[in-house]
Amino acid sequence: MVLQCRTAGVALVVVLFVLGTVLETSQASKTTTSREITVGGSEHWRLGFNYIDWVSKAGPFYVNDTLVFMYEPPGVTNFTHSVYLLKDFWTFRACDLKTGKLLANESQGGGEGFKFLLKEANPYFFACGMPTHCSKGQKFAFWPLPFNG
Ligand SMILES: [Cu+2]
């Protein structure tokens, strides 16, 4: 009986997995052009990399693209990071985090990274929230295009 339950459980998991894959695939075919973009490419999210330059090369970005921020959680390296969404160009230029919104804390960049879906065709301003990181250049901004056609 225990074995049967376990088998049924495994079968259910397999069915759900297959169903999930099918749903994902059908969704992907609807939005074939949405992408996952790792911020900074192989450099990930760190100090000492020019993200404004990276954006100009990696862009343009589109609504429904997903940004992936990858950085080591505390304890792995001496430098931890976070992800803030800043309010506007002026707070972005000044690296003013006070009015910004914390999107991902120091631990959320580990594993597969922190994923952020670009929902709107409005400007986005990103910065690291660790002291001095933003002013040292760990920030970038862009305006995603409405669709990728
Ligand atoms: Cu940082």
Image: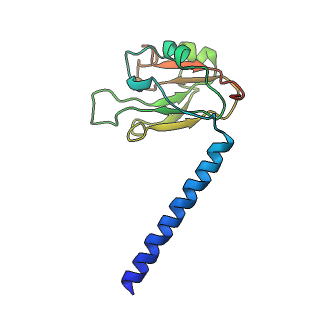
**Which quadrant is the C terminus positioned in?**
top right
Residue located at (63% from left, 33% from top): 33
- Viewer-side residue, 58 vs 75: 58
Residue located at (58% from left, 25% from top): 86
- Viewer-side residue, 72 vs 28: 28
On the image, the x and y values in percent for residue 121 come to 70, 27
On the image, the x and y values in percent for residue 137 come to 45, 14
Residue located at (54% from left, 25% from top): 98
**Relative to 55, is 44 above or below?**
below
Colour mapping used in the image? rainbow
Residue at the bottom extreme? Answer: 1
- Viewer-side residue, 10 vs 107: 10
From the viewer's perspective, tell me whether residue 55 is left or right of residue 33. left
Which quarter of the figure has residue 132? top left
From the viewer's perspective, tell me whether residue 42 is left or right of residue 18. left
Residue located at (64% from left, 35% from top): 64
**Relative to 10, is 139 above or below?**
above
**Relative to 74, is 98 above or below?**
above
Determine the quadrant in which ligand 1 lies: top left
**Number of on-image labels:** 0
On the image, the x and y values in percent for residue 93 come to 56, 13
On the image, the x and y values in percent for residue 1 come to 39, 87
From the viewer's perspective, tell me whether residue 130 is left or right of residue 19. left
